[in-house]
Amino acid sequence: MRPCTINKLTIGGEAPVRVMGVINCSPESFYSDSFIPTKEIHAKAVEMVEAGADMLDIGARSTAPNTQAISGTQEAERIDGALRELDGTGFTISVDTMNPWVLDVCMQHEIHAVNDIAGFCSPAYVKRVADAGLPAIVMATGYQPGDAVGVVATHQALVHVMQRCESAGVGNVILDPGIGLWTPLRSVEDDWELCRRFDEFLRYDRPLLAAASRKSFIGNLLNKEPQDRLFGSLAVNLTLLQKGAAMVRTHDVKETVDTIRVFEHLVKRR
């Protein structure tokens, strides 16, 4: 596997499993309890890092189905305010945006990676990432987030994603198979099948991101709202770790760190 390095943090290969804490600046989020007002972001970031987060993922707009859309200006204002709170902390930060103009705002701050659920579909976005030499977390996407329905389509999307990365000269990459409903075309069973066959995505020789935290397919099985999906999320993440995940994106850093520590002691003998 070709590891990815983000701000001197190695992900994949022989490195320990990494933890990405979610800093949610979107009140429209499917998991409303995770919304963090701007003035509380610094304290929440410190709490996550002290609990064991290796990096923080800052996002300011929700992409869940049936969520109220916001403008690029709103997204930029929110994420700009969040990043101002974190400037100077030295924390390793990725920005969860697919908008090239929002990325321009982000790049005025201390960021170390992008998290693009649009799979590098935007040439303008990719050029900015390549010119800045930023590492990238890139989701399996053909033309719009969530259009890869099922395992076969996810493989096809990842092939396209890798081609886009190679064409742009972006080699420092983590792949996200894209667990989540995203669009009405996808079903909860699609997500379960992505989890069951997660190890298939190791064939692309890049670290894999497990991004299933509190998502709808877990709630559908357990008949629980997002605030009650912690244990289901940990169970899914443990399975994804067994299937080769190199980093876990989570709302629940402390609990996820404990899960990984036990997993690595049992399986990797760290």
Image (spheres, rainbow, N blue to C red):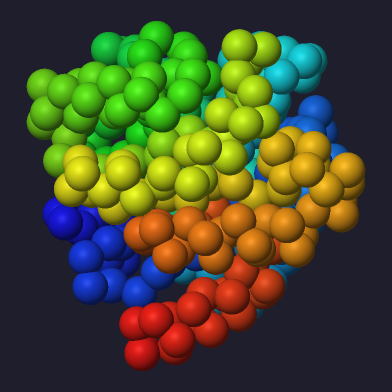
**Quadrant housing residue 64:** top right
Above/below status of 75 relative to 69? below
In-image side of 14 versus 63 (left or right): left
Say left or right for 223 vs 63.
Answer: right
Q: How many marks?
A: 0
Q: Is residue 241 above or below residue 163?
A: below
- Depth check: 162 or 231 in front? 231
Residue 16 coordinates in the image, percent (x, y): 35, 74
Residue pictured at 64% horizontal, 62% vertical: 235
Picture residue at 73% right of the left edge, 57% below the top = 232
Q: Identify the image quadrant of the C terminus.
A: bottom left
Can you give x and y, in whole percent of width and height, for residue 101 in the image? 45, 18
Residue 83 in view, yes or no: no
Q: Quadrant of the N terminus?
A: bottom left
Tell me, yes or no, if residue 267 can be seen here: yes
- Closer-to-camera residue (88/117): 117
Residue 257 in the image: x percent, y percent?
57, 75
109 or 115, which is in the foreground?
A: 115
Q: Position of residue 142 (x, y in %)?
A: 36, 14
Q: Quadrant of residue 2?
A: bottom left
Tell me which residue sits at (31%, 42%) in the image.
201
Q: Residue at x 44, y 19 (%)?
A: 148
